[in-house]
Image: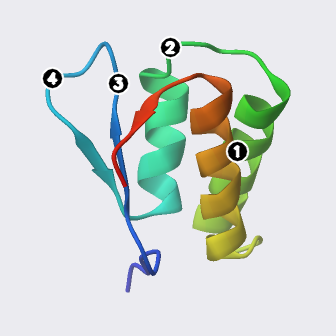
């Protein structure tokens, strides 16, 4: 069973069409790794590590979400929700 966050994160990335609805650390890690506008920064690295660990079951899911939201702010990405 795949767990989801209590509240999704909706963002708009410059290289992807439409909005991205992110419900899981796995999706967040994929976006950070493949589509993020920057590949550096404290929040970016922290979020990538925590989301990867959460999808492997070694880190709390909701705390990974918080790290992902911080990476959004660091990269100045449009967050719709």
Question: At 37% from the left edge and 55% from the top edge, which residue is drawn?
Answer: 81
Q: Is label 2 in contact with label 3 (beta carbons under 8 Å)?
A: yes
In the image, taking residue 17 as reference, residue 42 lies left or right, namely: right
| Furthest residue in direction bottom, as rendered | 1
Q: Earlier in the sequence, mark 2 or mark 1?
A: 2
Q: Earlier in the sequence, mark 4 or mark 1?
A: 4
Q: Is label 4 in contact with label 2 (beta carbons under 8 Å)?
A: no
Q: Quadrant of the N terminus?
A: bottom left
Residue 17 image label: 4
Q: CA distance from mark 4 to mark 3?
A: 8 Å
Q: Earlier in the sequence, mark 2 or mark 3?
A: 3
Q: Quadrant of residue 32?
A: top right
Question: At 58% from the left edge and 64% from the top edge, which residue is drawn?
Answer: 55
Q: CA distance from mark 4 to mark 2?
A: 14 Å
Residue 47 image label: 1
Above or below, comparing residue 23 to residue 78 in the picture: below
Q: Quadrant of residue 16?
A: top left
Which residue corresponds to mark 3? 13
């Amino acid at each position: 069973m795949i767990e989801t966050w209590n509240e999704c994160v909706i963002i708009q990335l410059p290289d992807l069409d439409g909005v991205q609805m992110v419900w899981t650390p796995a999706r967040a890690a994929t976006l950070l790794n493949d589509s993020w506008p920057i590949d550096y920064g404290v929040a970016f690295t922290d979020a990538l590590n925590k989301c990867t660990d959460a999808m492997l079951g070694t880190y709390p899911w909701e705390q990974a979400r918080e790290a992902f939201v911080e990476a959004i702010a660091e990269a100045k990405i449009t967050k719709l929700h």
